[in-house]
Amino acid sequence: MSAQPDMDSPPNTAPLDPTVRFSGRAQAYASGRPGYPPEIAAHLARELGLRQEAVIVDLGSGTGLSSRIFLQAGFRVIGVEPNAQMRAQAELALADMPAFVSVAGSAQATTLHEASADCVVAAQAFHWFDLNATRAESMRILRDPPRASLIWNVRRTQESDFSRGYERLLLEFGGEYPQIRERHTDEGSIGAFFGGSHWRRAEFEHATELDFELLTARVNSTSYLPTPRDRAYAPMMQALRRLFDSAQRNGLVQMQYDARVYFGVLHTPTTT
C-alpha cells in the first residue's frame, strides 16, 4: 500500500517562508483539511505520562486542527504559528476553548519562557522547520523530561480509484510535489530531532468524506497547487471535477489516511 503525507511542498517559484506561504489559503485550509483522530491525544497522555492540564505547545499550529484534539482531551495548548491569517483562523475556530493560547512565533523562536511546557507537538508542519534550531528551541522551553511528538496525516494513494486519480492530479499539477513530499519524514530526520533512536511510533486509521465544495477547499489549501490566478488552475479544476464525478457515491468521495505519530523524550546525543 502506497501513501503520501498530506503536506504542502513548495514549487520552484514559491517562497519557502511559511509566514507568507499560506496567506490567501487559510480559510480553505480551515475548511478543507482533515483533522486528527482524538485517540492520538489519549495515546500520548498514556505513553508519555502527561497529566491532565499539562501544557502542550503546538508548533506550526496553523488553523488549530491539531490543537483541538489536545484541548478536547483536557490539556492546555499554546499554539505557535507564524502566519497571521492561519493564526486568526485558529483563534476563531477555538474561541470557545479558554485553555487555548495563540502565539505569534515560530518553531525556531517560539517567544515562550524557558521550561514552560510539558510536551511539544508538530502536526503536518515539521517539514517547514529548521530541524536543529527547532530541536534546540524545544529543549529550551520544555520541562524535564523533554517530551515531544511529530504527527502526520499520511494519505493512502492506492486505496481506491479516487485515491489513485487524486495522486495523479497532484503529480500533474503539483510542481515539485514528487521531489520534496517526504521532506523530514524519514527516520534519519526524526532520529536527529529526538537525539537518537529513543522514539516510538503509532498509527491511527481514519477517513474524511468530501463533497465537491470541500474537495475544492482541500485543493485550494495545498500550497504547491495552482491558485485561481494561475493559467493551470482552470484545467486542474476541470480534471478535479471529472475525477469527482467518476468516483462520487451519493455526492461524496472518501480520502483515507494513516495518522502516523512519532513520540518520545528528546535526548542529548552522547559523544565519545
Image (cartoon, helix red, strand yellow):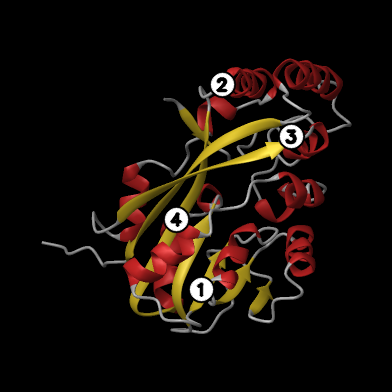
Report the residue at 39% width, 76% height from top. Answer: 50
Are discs 1 and 4 less than 8 Å apart at CB?
Answer: no
Q: Which residue is mark 2?
A: 160
Q: Is residue 145 left or right of residue 158?
A: left
Q: CA distance from mark 2 to mark 4?
A: 27 Å
Q: Which residue is mark 4?
A: 150
Report the residue at 63% width, 18% height from top. Answer: 165
**Amino acid type, residue under disc 4 in the picture:** Leu
User: Residue 219 has which mark?
Assistant: 3
The answer to whether 191 is drawn above or below residue 2 in the figure is below
Q: Nearer the viewer, residue 84 or 270?
A: 84
**Amino acid type, residue under disc 2 in the picture:** Ser
The answer to whether 253 is drawn above or below residue 147 in the figure is above
Q: Which residue is mark 1?
A: 56
Location of the N terminus (image quadrant):
top left
Question: N-terminal of the two: label 2 or label 3?
Answer: 2
Question: N-terminal of the two: label 1 or label 4?
Answer: 1
